[in-house]
Image (tube, rainbow, N blue to C red):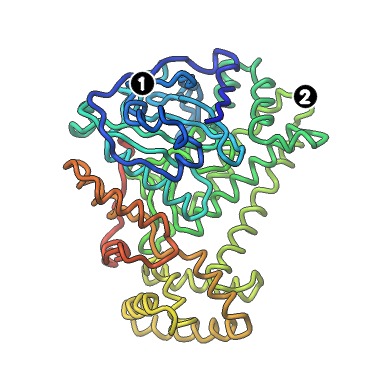
């Protein structure tokens, strides 16, 4: 691998160097060969031979520079003060096969100075959920952390019950969060200039060509964040805990806890059982992204040339960027061009889904059975299932809408329509029930279901033979979607 361990060269107040605390008897859970190839990990015999020991904290390769990062954050809208890597270590920074920086971050690595009341460990169930979700979003084309693999161990970890300790080697283009700047502003303000230069030079070098590199960098972060959240909305993904310490400066999805993929369409859905007010409900994610950035940006006023007015200009593109990306994506999901008539049909469609609590993923995919039925027998079955769930009144709404929708489709290239719909509407997403079945088997020492779900999510836009009905069956309309605990 091409190592580029630069974070360790920054001011020592920003981190604590330490090795991981070994797990007891670590064993292979799953290994992501695709990520290994992209990192050139697969080309290193030492890394391949010892990957279980590396992830288990028993062996630290010579070129690794493990450290825990300090950061802070706003959690559920309230200032939480110093946080930091309480159970994770930035093990190494490398350049991947495309020359892009990637962080190798071991989650579940043991106690650090930032552990607070925690034990520094991760449990198997949350490790599997994060492993599968990072893989799922990546294969869906949404910027996200991914993972090299995970291990399980004999280390016992107490949560609501005693569980098996595990560790995940998370891979992300950056682990710098909005909360890093919040920490610096409170505890080491003299470092802000150096740290901002580091963020620009490492992750946004193109901003150096601007007459005002800092403002260009801040605007780019705003725009990337807006596009990421638009991607979440389009696929029906709810992060569940959008604290400022859980948002990356690169606009990549980070920190999978009580996440969920929408099933029965309910924009007010709250997937985090600790979110008692619904702050992080699916429909609130765009506004929360704006709120987080609005909290983050003023810290840069300490830098020369950054004023309240220029920061307002940096934040201004957020709404337009989000709306354009979301509206274009929504039209593509219907195979329609981005124009007023298409948007009208799209929002009517979402209303139909919401009013009848139809399955979000299946319903969008089912439209291929309407547009090109002869070539899409699987989608025809989805369409039949969907329409049988409609009341008599809703049937009439559906008939009216589908007639107008097909009239728009007839004016377009059917080949292009089908291509757009097939490449934006997945057949499979990581439903909570899918993840739970994989977890239940893994807790019994059987990882075949983890592997099957992993392979299924590797090609989410295609119907696959390894799938079963449980992978795409929606819960009953009167069954609320399972909320997920923050405990991990």
Viewer-nearest residue: 280 or 64? 64
Q: Quadrant of the C terminus?
A: top left
Q: Residues within 10 Å of mark 1 (few under 14, many from 20)?
A: some
Q: Whole-percent x and y of residue 474?
A: 31, 65
Q: Residue furthest right?
A: 211
**Residue 419 visible to the viewer:** yes
Viewer-nearest residue: 169 or 287? 169
Which residue is the site of mark 1? 59
Q: Is residue 462 above or below residue 134?
A: below
Q: Which mark is residue 304?
A: 2
Query: Which quarter of the picture shows residue 197?
Result: top right
Please give left or right for residue 304 compared with residue 18 in the image.
Answer: right
Instruction: Give the label, 2 or 1, closer to the camera.
Output: 1
Viewer-nearest residue: 284 or 234? 234
Residue at screen point 41% across, 54% down:
458
Distance, label 2 to label 1, CA atoms, is 45 Å
Please give left or right for residue 175 compared with residue 57 in the image.
Answer: right
Q: Is residue 262 above or below residue 277?
A: below
Residue at screen point 71% across, 27% down:
301
Query: Which quarter of the picture shows residue 290?
Result: top right
Lower sequence index among marks 2 and 1: 1
Tell how many labels.
Answer: 2
**Residue 360 visible to the viewer:** no
């Amino acid at each position: 691998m091409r190592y580029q361990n630069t974070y360790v060269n920054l001011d020592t107040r920003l981190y604590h160097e330490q090795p991981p605390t070994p797990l007891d008897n670590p064993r292979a859970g799953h290994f992501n060969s695709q990520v290994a190839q992209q990192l050139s990990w697969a080309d290193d015999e030492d890394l391949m031979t010892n990957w279980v020991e590396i992830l288990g904290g028993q062996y630290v390769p010579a070129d690794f520079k493990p450290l825990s990062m300090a950061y802070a954050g706003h959690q559920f809208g309230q200032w939480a003060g110093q946080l930091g890597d309480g159970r994770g270590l930035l093990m190494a920074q490398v350049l991947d096969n495309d020359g892009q920086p990637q962080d190798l971050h071991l989650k579940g690595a043991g106690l650090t100075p930032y552990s607070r009341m925690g034990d520094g460990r991760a449990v198997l169930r949350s490790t599997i959920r994060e492993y599968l979700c990072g893989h799922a979003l990546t294969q869906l084309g949404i910027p996200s952390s991914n993972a090299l693999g995970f291990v399980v161990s004999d280390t016992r970890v107490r949560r609501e019950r005693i569980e098996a300790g595990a560790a995940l080697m998370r891979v992300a283009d950056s682990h710098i969060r909005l909360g890093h700047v919040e920490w610096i502003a409170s505890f080491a303000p003299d470092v802000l200039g150096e740290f901002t230069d580091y963020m620009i030079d490492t992750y946004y070098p193109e901003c150096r060509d601007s007459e005002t590199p800092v403002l260009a960098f801040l605007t780019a972060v705003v725009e990337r964040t807006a596009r990421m959240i638009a991607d979440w909305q389009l696929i029906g993904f709810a992060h569940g805990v959008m604290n400022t310490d859980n948002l990356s400066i690169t606009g990549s999805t980070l920190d999978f806890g009580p996440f969920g993929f929408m099933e029965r369409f309910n924009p007010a859905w709250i997937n985090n059982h600790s979110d008692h007010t619904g702050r992080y409900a699916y429909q609130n994610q765009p506004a929360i992204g704006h709120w987080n950035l609005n909290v983050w940006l003023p810290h840069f006023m300490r830098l020369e040339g950054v004023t309240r007015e220029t920061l307002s200009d940096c934040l201004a593109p957020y709404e337009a960027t989000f709306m354009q990306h979301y509206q274009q994506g929504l039209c593509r999901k219907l195979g329609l061009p981005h124009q007023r008539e298409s948007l009208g049909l799209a929002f009517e469609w979402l209303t139909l889904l919401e009013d009848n609590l139809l399955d979000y993923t299946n319903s969008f995919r089912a439209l291929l059975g309407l547009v090109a039925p002869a070539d899409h027998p699987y989608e025809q079955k989805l369409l039949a299932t969907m329409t049988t769930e409609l009341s008599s009144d809703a049937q009439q709404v559906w008939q009216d809408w589908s007639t107008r929708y097909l009239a728009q489709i007839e004016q377009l290239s059917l080949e292009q329509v089908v291509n757009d719909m097939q490449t934006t509407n997945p057949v499979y997403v990581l439903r909570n029930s899918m993840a739970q079945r994989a977890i239940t088997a893994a807790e019994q020492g059987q990882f075949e279901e983890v592997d099957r779900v992993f392979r299924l999510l590797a090609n989410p836009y295609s119907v696959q033979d390894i799938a079963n009905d449980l992978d795409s069956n929606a819960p009953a309309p009167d069954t609320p979607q399972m909320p997920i605990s923050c405990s991990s």
